[in-house]
Structure formats: C-alpha cells, structure tokens
Amino acid sequence: QQVFDLAADFQRLIQLLLENRTQKLPEANMLSVYNPKPDENTVSMDMDRFRTVKEWYHGTILEMTTLRHFKADYKWIAQQLGITTLQARAAVNRLRRLGVLETKGKKWLKTRRRFQFPTTSLQDAVNGFHQEMIYKALKTLEKKTPLDFEVRDITGITVAIDPKRIPEAKKRIQRFRNQIADFLSKGEPSEVYQLNVQLFGLTNSMHIKKVKKVTHAIH
C-alpha cells in the first residue's frame, strides 16, 4: 500500500514556489479580469501595461467593487485582502489610470471594459502572477474546517494523453473558464474567488518536443 505524506508534499511545493519566483515557466495564453458580457469595449493590453498591475490584488480590487457590501475605503480594502493601506491606494490609482476603474466619491465602478493580456511567449511578469495565485491555492489547503472544505474545490485528475490534442484542450479550458465565471457571477456577488486551471506534464517531455518539431515543419 502506498502512503502519501500530503503535509510534507505541501511544504515542498510552497518551498519550490518561493525558490523559483523568477524561473521561466509556461503561462496561459491570456490573463483577464472577467466581464460576463465582453463587447467592443474589451481592451487588450501589452506587457508593459500589465507589469503595472501584475500583483494579484489589482484584479481582486476591481472585482470587489461589484460586491453588494463593498466599501470605497482603502483601509477596509486592505483589511479584506491582507495588504497595506498604501498598497490598496496605489493599486486603485493604477486601475484608474488604466481606465478600468472609475471613482466618483464613494461610488467606485468597474467600467464595462474587460482588460486582457494576450501572451504568445514566456513573460516573467505573467509567470509571477500565476505563481502568486497557485501559492494562494496551496495556502487554502491549510484551512481544514468543514466550512473551508465546503466553499472551495481543489481537485485534479492524472491521465495519459496524446500531446497533439493539447491545443484543442486549451481552447476547451478557456471556454470552460468563461462558462463557470458566467454561472458564478449571477445573483448577488458577495465574495471574490479565483479559478485556476493547470494542465501540465508529469513525464519526460521528449515526445512532446518531437510533436512540436513536426508541427513547425508542416507550417
């Protein structure tokens, strides 16, 4: 019988993330802050602009403005997110400059714009964002009450695959993300959640490299 030391594995994963913050890892094809009805106001931004809001809490603050109990108060925002008041104020100012947040007194509005950051190559800023969010997912595993278990879903599946199907799988994952976001955003939002999706190899990648070489030759 095989026994898994989950606590030890968890600590090793955290340590690995902390030690490899600048390591170049593959990132998703797009980062975005969800808008259930993307339209002509959807804006794609380059990496220079993304670097100004690369920390995880920028997108979270933007989504918080849609919560029914939201308070347009830097101290309250900082307390909710575990950041400093100075960080909260600076983040709001950056979001305003990007045009994705409007502040009129105590009324803060997420604009109809959906800001997204298409990526076609490895980017340290994007890698850092994903590592922050994966680290936060790992930290939630330390919360072990029945309620904590009930309000999260951290699951996975291990499967043998044909690497040639990966491009289509990535398209399906993107559709799935949008469908889940559309479903969860209905009603009266009172919390901000993060949906992470990771699809990665566990075995030697030589076969995948061979497939990539053939694909490039065809094109």
Image (cartoon, rainbow, N blue to C red):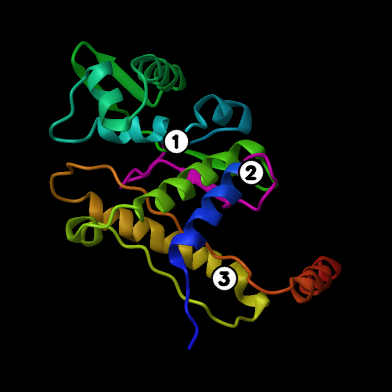
Query: Helix or strand or loop: what does disc 2 sit on?
Result: helix
Other-residue count near label 2 (Cα within 10 Å), few / some / many at <14 / 14–19 / ≥20? few
Q: Which mark is residue 199?
A: none
Q: Nearer the viewer, residue 4 or 120?
A: 4
Q: Which mark is residue 56?
A: 1
Give residue 140's position: percent from left, percent from top: 35, 51
C-alpha distance separating marks 3 and 1 = 28 Å
Q: Which mark is residue 19?
A: 2
Query: Helix or strand or loop: what does disc 3 sit on?
Result: helix
Other-residue count near label 3 (Cα within 10 Å), few / some / many at <14 / 14–19 / ≥20? few
Q: Kindly identify the amino acid type of the residue bearing the numbered disc 3.
A: Glu
Report the magenta stretch's main SS: loop
Is residue 168 found inside the magenta-colored segment of the image?
Answer: no
Q: Which residue is mark 3?
A: 168
Q: Reply above or below: 120 against 164.
A: above
Q: Kindly identify the amino acid type of the residue bearing the numbered disc 2.
A: Glu
Q: Quadrant of residue 67?
A: top left
Other-residue count near label 1 (Cα within 10 Å), few / some / many at <14 / 14–19 / ≥20? some
Q: Reply above or below: 22 against 152.
A: above
C-alpha distance separating marks 2 and 3 = 32 Å
- Foreground mark, 2 or 1? 2
Q: What span is in magenta?
A: 19-40
User: Looking at the image, which residue is at 21% across and 57% down?
Assistant: 145
- Foreground mark, 3 or 1? 1
Residue extending farthest to the top is: 105
Q: Reply above or below: 78 against 199.
A: above
- Counting residues from the start of the chain, the first of labels 2 and 3 encountered is 2
- Counting residues from the start of the chain, the first of labels 3 and 1 encountered is 1
